[in-house]
Amino acid sequence: MIAISSRALGLAFAASLLLTAPTFAQTAAPAPAKTEKAEKPRTTASIECSKEADAKGLHGKERKKFRSDCKKEKGGTAAPATK
């Protein structure tokens, strides 16, 4: 009889370990919060070139190329424009 009760006690102990194990399991770290990209300040040349592209009705690749060339001509390294 002692053998049967010690087996039952051992089985109960093992079952309790299996049932409580998920409680102690390590959880995954939370995903890092998405941060918004900090916008670069726009130069006065950039703003002027955008206005010119708007006036000409340019869109897509044409607009991108026009603005790139325009900023090179105007020296896009000017001080950032204030809003």
Image (tube, rainbow, N blue to C red):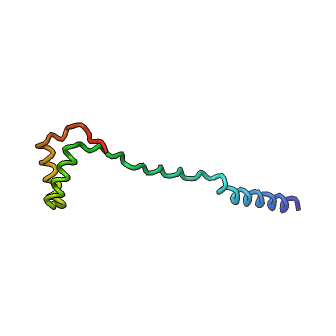
The quarter of the displayed image where residue 22 is located? bottom right
Q: Is residue 5 above or below residue 33?
A: below
Q: Position of residue 80 (x, y in %)?
A: 26, 40
Asked whether, in this view, residue 55 is left or right of residue 29, the answer is left
User: Residue extending furthest right?
Assistant: 1
Taking 50 as reference, is 16 left or right?
right
Up/down of 80 relative to 19, above or below: above
Quadrant where the image shows the C terminus: top left
Q: Quadrant of the N terminus?
A: bottom right
Give the residue displayed 20% in from the left and 52% down from the top.
50
Give x and y (percent) for residue 81: 26, 42
| Horizontal relation, residue 56 to residue 4: left or right | left
Q: Position of residue 33 (x, y in %)?
A: 47, 50
Count of numbered tags: 0
Q: Nearer the viewer, residue 16 or 67?
A: 67
Quick one: 23 or 19, which is closer to the camera? 23
The residue depicted at 19 percent of the width and 48 percent of the height is 48
71, 2: nearer the viewer: 71
Query: What's the residue at 33%, 46% (across, down)?
Result: 39
Expressed as whole percent of the image width and height from the top left, the position of residue 64 reads: 17, 54
